[in-house]
Image (cartoon, rainbow, N blue to C red):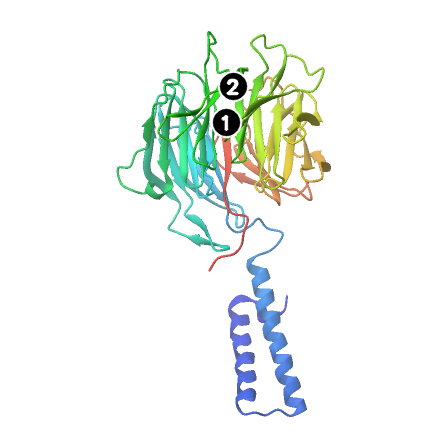
Amino acid sequence: MHQCCKYKQGRYICNIVSNIAQIFIMKKLFTLQRFALVFAAGAVLSACHKDHDHEQFDEKKEYRYVRVLVSDEASNQVTQIIPADASIATFEARHPMATLYRSATNRYAALVYGSQNTTQFFDTGLDWHDGHVDTKGTPKWAAIIAEGARPSYFKSRGKTAAIFNDQDGTLSFGDENSFHTSGARFSRVNAGLPAHHGAFELFDNGNIAVSTVGGTATSPNRVKIINSSGATMHESTVEGARLHGSASDGANAVFGSFTDATQATGGVLVVNQSGQQRMIANPDGFGATRLGTILYAKGANKFVGFGGTKGAYLIDLAANRITPIYEGNDAYQCKVDYAGKNLLVLTLDGKLRVYDLVTMNLKKEGVITNAVAASEAMKPVLEATEKFAYLAVPAAGEVHQVRLTDFNDVVKHAVTARPVRLTLLGFESNESH
C-alpha cells in the first residue's frame, strides 16, 4: 500500500496535494506542464482515498455491520461477536439456555425462556435506513418484556413481533417502536385455541395462520387464520396430523405435517393468506416421516423442508411437489444463509455442503469440524452469511468462523463454556453515514 494511505500520514499528505492542486487552479496557471501536475495530484488524491477506504472495509473480512449472538447452556452470559474486528462483548441475560430468534428488521434478537415463561429482547443498536446502517446507541437489553405460559416460537414481520404460548394456546404481540418504553409489555390475545405445542406465521395483510387441535386429536392437526385481535378470518379446510415447523413468504405459510391421522405418510400444508389450503405430499417412498423444519429463502424465493432422518428438500409451491436437495439420514444442521440465496447442510462426519438455491447446484463441500455422534445431545449449531459460516461448538467453548470460499480459513472466537444457541443479526453492509 502507498505510504500516503496510512491513516494519519496519508490524510495529511493527501490534504497537502489537494491544496497544491487548488492553488494552481485558483491562480489559473494552466500551462500544459502545470495542468499535468494538477492531474497527477488529483490521481494521487483519488488513489489515497480509495486505498484508505479499502483499508477500512477489507473485502476478505466480514461485513462491518454483521453481529453474532450466542447463548450458553448453563451460564446467563450472552456473547456478542463483531466478526469484522473480532471484538467480543458479554451481557447478563435473565436465564441460561435462551432460544434465539432474529427480528424481521434484523435489529433485535428475541431470547425465549420457555421454562421461565419469559422472553427478553437484545438490541444491537443497528438500524437500516435509505441504503445505509444507522447506529442508534450501544448494544443493550430492550426495556420491553414478554410474559406468557411456556412461550415457544417467535415470529415477526415488519415491526410486529409475536410469540406462541404453548401452555394456554394464547399469542403475545409487541411493536418494536415500544421496545425501549419503560415498563412496556407484550399484549396477550386469546383466540380460543387449546393448549398445544403450536406453530404460526404472520402474513403481509396483518393476519396470522395458526395451528389448532381439531376433533379428538391431542396434537395440532389444522391451521386457521385469525386477525391480530384473535377473531377467526378463515376456518381450516384441510386436516393433517402433528403439524411441526413453519415458514412464510408473506402470502403463503407452509407447515410440516403428516397427511392424515394414520401418520403413515407426510407432506406440507400450504395455507394462503386468502384462506385457501392444500397438502403437498412427500415424494413416493418417503415413508412415515414428516419434514419437521420448514425454511423460507428470501433471496431465492423458495421454501426448503428438512428432516433429520431424510435430509433437505425443495418445496415447489408452483409445481405442487417436493424434490430432494440432499438425501441422507446424517444431516443434523440445515440452514438458509442470511440473504436467503444459499442452503447449508452439515452432516455428522463434519462435512458442510453449500447449495445455490437459485441454480440448485452444489457450490462447495468439505469438512469444517470434527465428527459428532448422532446421540450427542448438544451438537454444533450453524448459521451463515454470504462470506462465512459460523459454528457454535459446545465442546470447545468457541464459535468457529469459516470462510465459505476456503474451508481451511477458520477464525476461532472464545466465548462461554458451553455455547449452544447462535443467531445472526445486523446487516450485510459496510455503508454508514
Helix, strand, or loop for circle 2? loop
Number of the label disc, if any, that sits on residue 237: 2
Q: What residue type is labelled 2?
A: Thr
Task: Please give the count of numbered marks on the rendered protein.
Answer: 2
Q: x%, y% of residue 340?
A: 59, 39
Number of the label disc, if any, that sits on residue 6: none
Among the 4 quarters of the image, the one containing residue 266 = top right
Horizontal side of 51 relative to 157 (left or right) equals right
Q: Give the mark nearer the N terminus: 1 vs 2.
A: 2
163 or 374: nearer the viewer: 163
Neighbours of disc 2 within 10 Å: few (<14), some (14-19), many (20+): few
Say whether residue 93 is visible. no
Q: What residue type is labelled 1?
A: Gly
Neighbours of disc 1 within 10 Å: few (<14), some (14-19), many (20+): some
Q: How far apart are marks 1 and 2 (CA)?
A: 9 Å
Say whether residue 13 is visible. yes
Q: x%, y% of residue 229?
A: 35, 29
Q: In this view, does 57 lie above or below 199?
A: below
Q: Which residue is drawn at 27% across and 40% down?
A: 182
Image quadrant containing the N terminus: bottom right
Q: Is residue 342 above or below residue 266?
A: below
Q: x%, y% of residue 409?
A: 66, 43
Among the 4 quarters of the image, the one containing residue 374 = top right
Question: Residue lying farthest left?
Answer: 183
268 or 384: nearer the viewer: 268
347 or 201: nearer the viewer: 201
Among the 4 quarters of the image, the one containing residue 289 = top right
Task: Tell me whether circle 1 and circle 2 mark residues in contact (CB < 8 Å).
Answer: yes
Q: In this view, does 424 lie above or below 16?
A: above
Horizontal side of 328 relative to 69 (left or right) equals right
Horizontal side of 321 relative to 228 (left or right) equals right
Number of the label disc, if any, that sits on residue 275: 1
